[in-house]
Amino acid sequence: MDDITPRFIFEHDFPKLIQARLDIAKRINAVIHFDVQGPRGGKWTVDCTKASEWISSGVRGIPRMTVSVADDDFVKIHTKALNPQVAGLTGRVRFKPLSLSLMTELGRLLF
């Protein structure tokens, strides 16, 4: 798991997932900021209002939601070593503002 980093997930895995699930991205139709904290973290934007090039490094645009998570937990969620629902319920992933419908759609899109 050490070779999988948040940067790798955002740059390589998420674009493929979004491409495969364009119908979900179109339903989301929002900008989401990710604040991944820790030594392998960073900030990324997922922009589901665009037809392509959904992922960018840094924060761009006005987000409908910001997701905050530790780098290790983010990788664990992506690799299915940590259930995203459990992570959310235990505060390991935080959403601001909290929107259950957007959280659900985001989970279907990226995880």
Image: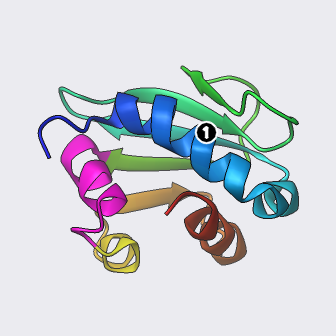
Q: Position of residue 58 (x, y in %)?
A: 54, 20
Q: Is residue 3 left or right of residue 110?
A: left
Position above or below: 29 against 43: below
Between 89 and 23, the one nearer to me in the picture: 23
Q: Quadrant of residue 63?
A: top right
Residue 97 shown in magenta: no
Residue at point 41%, 39% (across, down): 9
Seen at 42% across and 59% down, the residue is: 94
Q: Residues within 10 Å of mark 1 (few under 14, many from 20)?
A: some
- The rendered magenta stretch, by its main secondary structure, is classed as helix
What is the residue that sits farthest to the left in this orientation? 2
Q: Residue at x 86, y 63 (%)?
A: 27
Coloration of the structure image: rainbow
**Which residue corresponds to mark 1?**
15
Q: Nearer the viewer, residue 50 or 90?
A: 50
Q: Position of residue 47 (x, y in %)?
A: 74, 37
Span of residues in magenta: 70-82
- What is the number of callouts on the image? 1
Classify mark 1: helix, strand or loop. Answer: helix
Q: Amino acid at mark 1?
A: Pro
The x, y position of residue 89, in whole percent, is 36, 79
Q: Residue at x 60, y 52 (%)?
A: 17
| Residue 18 x/y as whole percent | 67, 49
- Front residue of 102/16: it is 16
Residue 27 against residue 35 in the figure, above or below: below
